[in-house]
Image (spheres, rainbow, N blue to C red):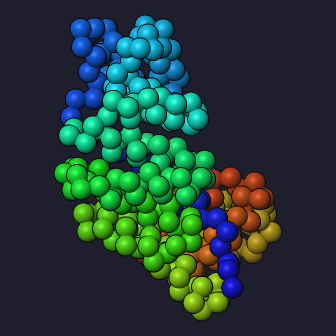
Amino acid sequence: MRFITCLCVALVTAGIVEAEGTCKSFPNNADVEQKLVALSEAKAAVGEQIAQSILTTVPLAERNFCVNYELGRHFTRSKKFDEARGFLTDAIKNASFEDHSSFAVWNVVGFTYLQQKQFEKALENFEKQEGHSAFRLLSKKNRMKVYNNAGYTLIQLARYGEALDYLNHAAGLGSVLALKNIAIVESITETLEAEDKNIPGIFSAVVASSRTSSGVQPIIDTMASKLGAEADEFFVFRTSNGRYSISLGAYESYPRALERRTNAVSKGISDAYVASISEWADVTDEF
């Protein structure tokens, strides 16, 4: 029996590996170097202006690794993934293992495929890095990102045992994100083995939040009306930042909470999400 068709909504990706070493270099042109630094830190709208300026300023034949890499990262952040891969393909031609720049490019390429749900192609690029003899020379932060992204991708492919191998490596390096995804994988596998998504778990479908306790009950009343639920089906948790998270159901398996979240989205609660409630305080009885 299979309960899960897409797990994208609540899993956590680790993000893009940064190129290690000098990555903003453009010899003999300080203006381009400044633009590369600005592009690496810019938000999408401002970044677009900087990117177009670089494309206008630097002829195709003179675009080195850093120019193509930063342009590729920019277009990735702007969700123009096909365009991004064009620049990243050019970047890899000038990348090397000596300064680890090849790993950075592979990771961004993998990330673009991941965002487009082309999971096999994403995994191919993540595994290129982990399987290379120079991988161990990367910083701990970047190795964690590779392990996490590979693990995330394998979950999408329903290859849970392999996913856990990568996520455990990331957790061993100190990744909190990996621990969250490990808990999700364990819940999925337990549910599949039991062939019952209604077994107990540590997840809930969060449908709203409130900064104050006085705002909780009005939100529950509104959510009950929107979702066609009874008020006593909602749980209230106080999170580490002091906010109140309001969930429909609680202490459920990940597949069951995901099902609730999907239903809430279909009824207009677009920011609903699945959360692990293991570290939250259950304050439902206060309401």
What is the quadrant of the C terminus in the image?
Answer: bottom right
Q: Nearer the viewer, residue 253 or 18?
A: 18
**Quick check: 245 left or right of 18?**
right
| Residue drawn at point x = 40 percent, y = 46 percent | 107
Residue 35 x/y as whole percent = 36, 16
Residue 200 x/y as whole percent = 56, 87
**Quick check: 52 left or right of 107?**
right
| Residue drawn at point x = 51 percent, y = 20 percent | 48
**Quick check: 157 left or right of 259?**
left
Q: Nearer the viewer, residue 264 or 7?
A: 7
| Residue drawn at point x = 33 percent, y = 71 percent | 168
Residue 130 x/y as whole percent = 33, 58
Camera sees residue 12: no
Q: How many marks?
A: 0
Task: Classify 11 as above or below 21.
Answer: below
Camera sees residue 184: yes
Task: Classify 90 as above or below 63.
Answer: below
Residue situated furthest bottom in the rendering: 194
Quadrant assignment, res 37: top left
Residue 282 x/y as whole percent = 48, 75
What is the quadrant of the N terminus in the image?
Answer: bottom right
Task: Classify 280 as above or below 78.
Answer: below
Task: Classify 197 as above or below 71.
Answer: below
| Residue drawn at point x = 62 percent, y = 75 percent | 255
Q: Nearer the viewer, residue 123 or 74?
A: 123
